[in-house]
Amino acid sequence: MAGERSLTDRRDQDSYVRDHFDRTTRRYLLSILSDSIIEEHRRYPAHPSEPLSRLLAWCQRRPIDERYAVKREADGSFRLITFSGERGRGPAYCGEERFASYEEARHGVFLRHIKDLTGQ
């Protein structure tokens, strides 16, 4: 079947394109990342600027096993969890840190994504 690409070849090309897009996106996000964007998220998460919107969109597009969520504990505090991405395997806590409010926990999730982005 000359001229047809195998399924493996297409997957390799798809993977290459996704990796290239991710590298380009990360490079851009690192160029706009600043203390003011982080502070903007902490203060005004409902109405983000364009740079913050792009950063938030990147956070939401990450693979499920690279995302974070907020879980409310029985004592009323909030903790961060991450998903395994595997069927039948539950979420895991991201450390022992607890937050007093949901808004603080959401900002904690944002800071975790920033940490992943910067590789720190």
Image (tube, helix red, strand yellow):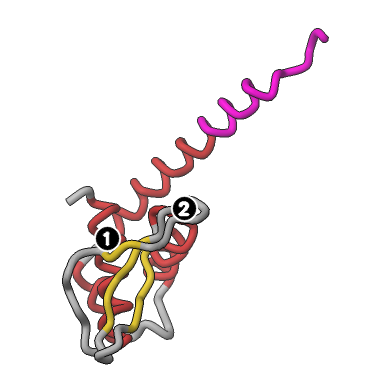
The circle on residue 85 is: 2
Residue segment shown in magenta: 1-16
The amino acid sitting under disc 2 is Gly
Q: Categorize mark 1 by other alpha carbons within 10 Å: few (<14), some (14-19), many (20+).
A: some
Mark 1, residue position? 114
- Reply above or below: 28 against 23: below
Choose the circle earlier in sequence order: 2 or 1: 2
Mark 2 to mark 1 CA distance (whole Å): 21 Å
**Residue under the image location 41 percent in, 67 percent down:** 56
Q: What secondary structure prevails in the magenta region? A: helix
Q: Is residue 91 left or right of residue 108?
A: right
Instruction: Please tell me in which quadrant of the rendered image residue 58 appears.
Output: bottom left
Indicate yes or no whether the magenta region holds residue 102: no
**Residue under the image location 35 percent in, 76 percent down:** 70
Residue 41 in view of the camera = no
Instruction: Please tell me in which quadrant of the rendered image residue 44 appears.
Output: bottom left
Q: Secondary structure at mark 1?
A: helix
Indicate yes or no whether the magenta region holds residue 7: yes
